Image (cartoon, rainbow, N blue to C red):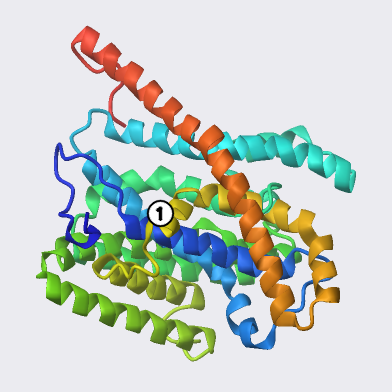
Amino acid sequence: MDQSTIDKPDHGEPYVRLDFLDALRGFAAFYVILYHLALIPKPNLDIPEWLRFYTANGGTGVTLFFVLSAFALSYSLDARRGEPNATLHFYVRRFFRIAPLFYAMLVFYFFRDIAVYDKVHGTDEILINASMLFNLWPDHMLGYVWASWTIGVEMLFYLVFPLIHRHVRGLVQGITLFFVFVLLAQAWGFFIGHYGVLLGYLSADQVATVKHHGLLSNLPNFMLGILAYRVYFDHLVRLDPKTQKQVGAALIAAFVFLYTALLSGRLNGMLWGGLVWQGVCYSLLVLGLGLRPLSLLVNRQTVRLGKVSYSLYLLHPTMVFALAPVYYWLYQVLPNKTLAYGSSFIITASAVTALSLLTYRMVERRGIAWGEAVIGRWIRGRDRSGRSMITDA
């Protein structure tokens, strides 16, 4: 199916996966892996000069995840618009989509940290992490599962998303809320920077972490994903196929231009911070590939990788940590940094992909099935009683 010609999901229509979203999830995961490959090993790996510009900004792949998440959630809720208890079902699906693999990693890291660092995570820390609301605690915002801070942000966004989705049904409302979120993020950054330590809310070394990793700092990028969804389905997919391809190519070109300007520092100080510019850039890429899914980027292999991107993201830090001795050996035996870094990346990507395909099948898909089973039991209970047993929140 040509994903660029899909109409906006309507009442009663089946949910159809959008290949360009899955492909971009895969690229986001590997961009973060490229970034962490240099940073996790101690001492850090030496990045080839020509690649340094892009590798150093691989952390922006997380912003792409946030934009894609909001776009996909908007699409999913609209596709299930007529479902009874839709909001409660949304929370059930999100929990069972995220929790099983995350809880497995909580257990793994608990024992790994004892074995490797002689560190025992206390009961309070475990419970805070298990709640998946650890973004609310400055001391625990990063989570003890490496790279899991994004889960803390996502889970808080999930709590407010149904309300946003219900009341933001057009571009004017969405743009207005986007600017509200930008102002809120700036106010949060100002408060944290000037009063966080003074009021005893933070220690000095927590300021940068809380400013960058808090939900409020990232809300504008989630809103950009919702706006991209509205623009795509309300306007762009209604264009004729030829115009769609032309507009898609223009949007991809705009992404390349703006992203290069962002990485080179030319957008610093313009309108809003660099974090929001990341979201603007990636929204252009999402829309561009949605209209013109270039086969080099959107194909069967990239789509498959995108489906296991959650596992790729959560598993890769440990894989990089474990393979560090291999990287150092490669740097000794290979003639230049490009070959050494490239070989390190290929080995890491291959190993973590193989493991992710396994955890996706054994953990993630089972979690999704459990969520649907829970919802199915509620629906069957409602059918037997003739009314809903659980009211929509």
Quadrant where the N terminus is found in the figure: bottom left
Percent position (x, y) of residue 353?
A: 58, 52
Q: Residue at x 18, y 11 (%)?
A: 386
Q: Which residue lies furthest to the right in this view?
A: 118
Q: Which of 69 and 158 is in front in this view?
A: 69
Percent position (x, y) of residue 57?
A: 58, 75
**Quarter of the image holding residue 3?**
bottom left
Q: Which of 184 and 268 is in front in this view?
A: 268
**Quarter of the image holding residue 230?**
bottom left
Location of residue 7 with respect to 27 vertically, above or below: above
Q: Which residue is drawn at 29% across and 45% down?
A: 76
Quadrant where the C terminus is found in the figure: top left
Percent position (x, y) of residue 66?
A: 45, 59
Q: SS class of the residue under badge 1?
A: helix
Q: Nearer the viewer, residue 334 or 170?
A: 334
Return the residue at label 1: 69
Location of residue 128 with respect to 186 vertically, above or below: above
Q: Which of 360 and 347 is in front in this view?
A: 347
Percent position (x, y) of residue 21?
A: 36, 58
Residue 208 visible from this viewpoint = no
Location of residue 313 with respect to 218 vertically, above or below: above
Q: Which residue lies furthest to the top in this view?
A: 384
Residue 176 visible from this viewpoint = yes
Q: Is residue 16 left or right of residue 213?
A: left
Q: Which residue is drawn at 50% across and 87% down?
A: 268
Q: Is residue 382 left or right of residue 47?
A: left
Q: What residue type is labelled 1?
A: Ser
User: Mark 1 Cα within 10 Å, few/some/many (few <14, many 20+)?
Assistant: many
Q: Which residue is drawn at 63% across and 87% down?
A: 50
